[in-house]
Amino acid sequence: MMKKYDPERHRQRLSDLMAQSNKVAQLVKEGTFNTINEALIECIYKADGHNEFYSFNEWKKRGARVKKGSEAFCLWGQPIPRTVKRENGEEDEKDFFPMAYVFSNLQVVTEDTK
């Protein structure tokens, strides 16, 4: 049975992602990593055998099944352009970055690991 959407849990995960992103932002500014997502994966998520990260659908395409109850890692999704109105009535174009959910190699079952 699929879990119901929990807005409070979503806000908490977003807050956590923003805090983690702030921790690695300087590494991106310095050029150590190209993107925040790359820095998050390399500095925070890659540990204890978590080496490959893909979306649910990408694992499915690769012939793997995400284990029931696995909690996804959060990254930033592809930017979506949005029009934002300022207080003075002017409009600005800004990119909105949604959360993307990925699973690691330790959270999937493949034909090899059955």
Image (spheres, grey):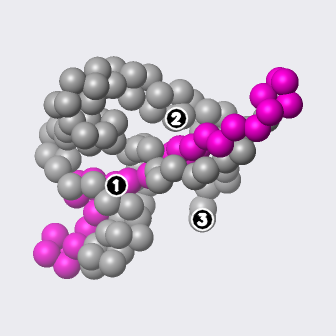
Q: Give the secondary structure at mark 1.
A: strand
Q: Is residue 1 above or below residue 114?
A: above
The tag on residue 13 is 2
Q: Position of residue 110 (x, y in %)?
A: 22, 73
Q: Which label's residue is closer to the chain start, 2 or 3?
A: 3
**What is the quadrant of residue 30 in the picture?**
top left
**What is the quadrant of residue 36 in the picture?**
top left
Q: Tell me the amino acid under the disc marked 1.
A: Phe
Q: CA distance from mark 2 to mark 3?
A: 22 Å
Q: Residue at x 29, y 21 (%)?
A: 26
Image-based side of 101 in relation to 4, left or right: left
Q: Are marks 3 and 1 in contact (CB under 8 Å)?
A: no
Q: Give the secondary structure at mark 2.
A: helix
Q: Residue at x 56, y 30 (%)?
A: 12
5 vs 3, nearest the viewer: 5
Work out which quarter of the rendered image holds the C terminus and state it.
Answer: bottom left
Q: Which label's residue is closer to the chain start, 3 or 1?
A: 3
Q: Residues within 10 Å of mark 3 (few under 14, many from 20)?
A: few
Q: Residues within 10 Å of mark 1 (few under 14, many from 20)?
A: many
Q: CA distance from mark 3 to mark 1?
A: 19 Å
**What is the quadrant of residue 93 in the picture?**
top right
Query: For mark 1, what is the residue?
Result: 103
Q: Give the secondary structure at mark 3.
A: loop
Q: CA distance from mark 1 to mark 2?
A: 15 Å
Task: Check if residue 103 falls in the magenta segment.
Answer: yes
Q: Tell me the amino acid under the disc marked 3.
A: Met
Q: Nearer the viewer, mark 3 or mark 1?
A: 1
The tag on residue 1 is 3
